[in-house]
Image: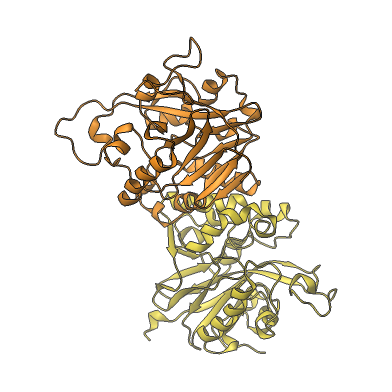
Chain colours: A yellow, B orange
Amino acid sequence: MTGSDSYEVFAVRYATRGQRKRLESFIMADDHDGPMPIDYFVWAVVNAERTIIVDTGFDHAEAKLRNRVLTRLPREGLAMLEIDANRVKDVVVTHLHYDHAGTTDHFPQARFHLQEKEMRFTTGRHMCQHVFSHAFAPEHVCKMVEHLYKGRLAFHDGDAEIAPGVSVHLIGGHTMGIQCVRVNTARGPVLLASDATHFYENIEKTAPFPIVYSVGDMVAGYDKMRKLAASPKHIIPGHDPLVMQRYPTPRAALDGVVVRLDVAPAG
Amino acid sequence: MSQPESYEVFAVKFGSWPERRRHNNFIMADPHDGPGQLDFYVWACVNDKRTVVVDLGFDRKEAEARGRKIDRLPHEGLAMLNIDPAKVGHVVISHMHWDHVGTQDAFPNALFHVQDLEMEFVTGRLMNDYFFRRPFTLEHVQAMIRRIYAGRVRFHDGEGEVVPGISVHHIGGHTLGMQSVRVLTRRGWVVLASDASHTYENFEQTQPFPTVINVADMVAGYKKLVRLAETPKHVIPGHDPLVLKRYPAPRAGLEGIIARLDVAPNA
């Protein structure tokens, strides 16, 4: 592995929500009414040569529509790491849910990496059913098609290397085309699971999340992620507040906003 | 399938494209190249219970953007048959090319019928290439996506019933999800080929049209059209000016604009 194949990896928290219960996180929740707060992240993969952003969160309009509180726009969080969204060349969109694909026009120079199956899912017959469509914003999907018609989409079908040391992997389950991102770091390959596992508990206890297209694919995805990561401690769930507790902030000024994932976790 | 009903069927011309040459309409260069005018149509299937419209043409803005001329908006042509677009319950979209799916807003209460493969095509990886994207219009595709999320689209995979006596049949070839429409009439099963065969000559002489994704599927489609129709004279091509010469106007004053297709042609 050369230096240019290894990256620093950051989780940037752009929103949080405390009023949430366990039954919203597990298909079979033992304690339905117990609290289950959730954090919202985008991720940055950085070395001297490249900056790759994973997911684009949502904006103020979408927050208002869904009654969410936005702490900061994703690009504002990235700016705290000296990353200028205007200059980012590659953005991985893990899936097209409203909280992952919302501010793509804040990245005017980026090429967007998406699984073919995700676009097929979000423009196809399943979106006639509320049970599948409710977590998507039609305007986000329309915007992604606009990027496509401007030649700015990189479609992937399964596994693909998008830069030396960075690859995407189709997982499915949560949505038809959700993908995770594997990144080489100084501590070995780290896996940004995004919503292939929202919380540590989903994958660790094989307790599927209730917003789901295929439970079978979701559970098979847990196994696939374990194989892709150097160890279970290299898997980063997409929404777990524990991520902010287990990993260190890169510097004091970023406390509570950014944590660094390419170093060993505390727990 | 329900007990089939019988329909009156009309071709409504809303524009023409007189500048075309024969080599624009046939994939194999013609040493005796000559004029190859095409006309633009939408179609209506009507009985005392229902009105089903096939394709939506395009509007004046699209005509200007593409340098084409229209004589009337498609729904203005339908109004000549006393069809109120607000009361149309079903619209079949044969395919998503710019000249077939443009005036969606004029039909606010219709359920739209489209093939799975057509949406997959127009939002999929081939659209990264201008060659494939050129005949599609981003705003048309986005309008269809919004309609899907509003629950106003019914997807078909292959063959499907629209209403009793009217069915769609996947053809492919011209686009990935091209479908034709089979309608029961007093003279038997009529097939509205739309662009599965632009002219009589395409399907009668097995001369593929040059805008094509898969020539083999297009040619197989010519045979399928004939198989679906009562006789070859029951196949109605999608753009042929001969349609208005072979079929009579439904009443005086509509000659050269509307032809009635549920009666025998004169050639």
Q: Quadrant of residue A156?
A: bottom left
Q: Residue A145 in the image: x percent, y percent?
A: 50, 51
Tell me if I can see residue B65 in this picture: yes
Q: Quadrant of residue B228?
A: top left
Q: How many marks?
A: 0
In the picture shown, does residue B262 fall above or below A25?
A: above
Q: Nearer the viewer, residue A116 or A160?
A: A116
Q: Residue A9 in the image: x percent, y percent?
A: 53, 77
Q: Residue A169 in the image: x percent, y percent?
A: 49, 74
Tell me if I can see residue B103 in this picture: no
Q: Residue furthest top?
A: B252
Residue at 65% in and 56% down: A133
Residue at 60% in and 19% down: B82
Q: Nearer the viewer, residue B69 or A99?
A: B69
Q: Residue B83 in the image: x percent, y percent?
A: 60, 23
Q: Residue furthest left?
A: B31
